Amino acid sequence: MSEELHDVRLRVNAGVRQIRVPARRLLSDALRHDCGLTGTHVGCEHGVCGACTVLVDGVPMRSCLMFAVSAEGAEITTVEGLTEDDDSLSPVQQAFRECHGLQCGFCTPGFLTTIAAGIERNPEPTEEEAREMVAGNLCRCTGYHNIVKSVLRAAEIQRERAGATQDASTEVASTEVASAADTSTDAGEAQA
Amino acid sequence: MKPAPFAYRRPSTLDEATRLLAEEPGAKVLAGGQSLVPLLSMRLAAPETLVDINHLPDLGHVVADATGVRVGALARHAEVLASEEAGRTQPLLAQALAHVAHATIRNRGTTVGSIVHADAAAEMPMVLSLLGGSLDVVSVRGRRTIAAADLFAGPLESTLAPDEIAVEAFFPALPAGGGVAFEEIARRHGDYALVGVAAVATTDGSGDDAPITSARLGFVSVSDVPVVVDVTDALDDPAEAALAELEPADDIHATAAFRTHLVRVLSPRVLARAVADSRSGALAGHV
């Protein structure tokens, strides 16, 4: 008797993958074997090590503790999906590079996804919050010190980049306000 | 480490889900899967069918009123933990939830699922027991409410029938002026507790001398089911009173003697914190 297969439409990294898998296919295996996205690493395969962490609708989850068929409809982000639109490094990737946040690299994809979501939620983590953020991920090389530094640096880079974008848009906005100010005093008063 | 083959069903209504469970005696419910999937992967469980309830509507609620907090079957631990309303109504929820695995597991795992999994080493079955809460379950035969005291039959065994789905847990509110505390000892951060103790206490008024009117302790990972002990009449030695009703066991994580020691250390410490919490009156009128 052959195993029943399911047609699953996975939304991964802003694209759509149509795969045909048995129900027992773990999401981690579906990403690696069926989608060819081998950036997601499989360590312990029972939810302890955190290497396989991906973002499901923006929230970190263990892909080894989910079935691909159950992830249908969710927006999944793997480590491959973290890079910026122009293929440059995301804040957390840049920070790991700067702070030597990895050595062998096996656990790194799980850290990167976890931290990317973590600094989105908490853009200014304290060192203690940074440690708590990565408490569910195991690394056997670094001793964690440089990973914690990377979290803090990633948050800093993210703030810098957000600030740069904001400065640019503020500049545009203030130019517009300046040119509008001559004619629209009434509107300005009404807003205040 | 791959699960054995199983048939997969994804009902879109609760009626359909209960019908599937009634029709297929070998079926198990899949909610968050943070306990079930490892069991499947290690082949400690191999159900013929999984009924995936993640796509059912109306089960993700966390709502609080003056009587307590109601948590739907699809509310993730993280959502319960993040609910300020739930935290105000019953502060023990957030204190205990912070010890449930790691944040990433809490993002997927459900509070109701953890209760039904009935692991005596898990926090939420004990919290439901200590608070005298209840669980609502549904099957083709209808809906019933199981009191926490009648819910845990043995290690990893609840009194749900195989065709029943737990749909909602109810955690009673902390009475105005009550106090709570929780503490656990684990080998590593986020691991299952070797011993965990929670306390709920009430005092007559506030201030350092306010007499204690009730005191209850709940124990994680000491016996093979969550155990609750009323220590109101044993305030000078709550640990001994508790040990009379506990059966600390040896396993690969800790010896019975070490667990007994931890009960002796944690019981008075946690009770004192709950009493101080109650006497401080910080929570008075929070409901």
Image (spheres, coloured by chain):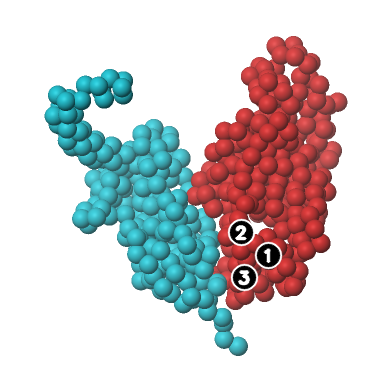
Question: Are the two marked residues, 2 and 1, in contact with CB atoms closer than 8 angstroms?
Answer: yes
Disc on the earlier residue, 1 or 3:
3
Q: Residue furthest bottom?
A: A1
Please name the amino acid that badge 3 sits on.
Arg
Question: Are the two marked residues, 2 and 3, in contact with CB atoms closer than 8 angstroms?
Answer: no
Which residue lies at the image location 80% right of the left edge and 49% below the top edge? B146
Choose top left, top right, bottom left or bottom right for residue B38.
Answer: bottom right
- Is residue B266 or residue B69 the one in the foreground? B69
Query: Which residue is disc 1 drawn over?
Result: B17
- Chain to which mark 2 belongs: B
Q: Secondary structure at mark 2?
A: loop
From this view, report whether residue B197 is shown above or below residue A139: above
Q: Pointer 3: residues within 10 angstroms few (<14), some, or many (20+)?
A: many
Query: Which residue is disc 3 drawn over?
Result: B9
Residue B49 image label: none
Which residue lies at the image location 76% right of the left edge and 61% below the top edge? B139
Disc on the earlier residue, 2 or 3:
3
Query: Which residue is disc 2 drawn over?
Result: B56
Q: Which chain is red?
A: B
In x, y percent, where is residue B160?
78, 57
- Is residue B143 or residue A176 the one in the foreground? A176
- Chain to which mark 1 belongs: B
Q: Secondary structure at mark 1?
A: helix
Alpha-carbon distance for marks 2 and 1?
9 Å
- Residue B256 is left or right of residue A112, and the answer is right
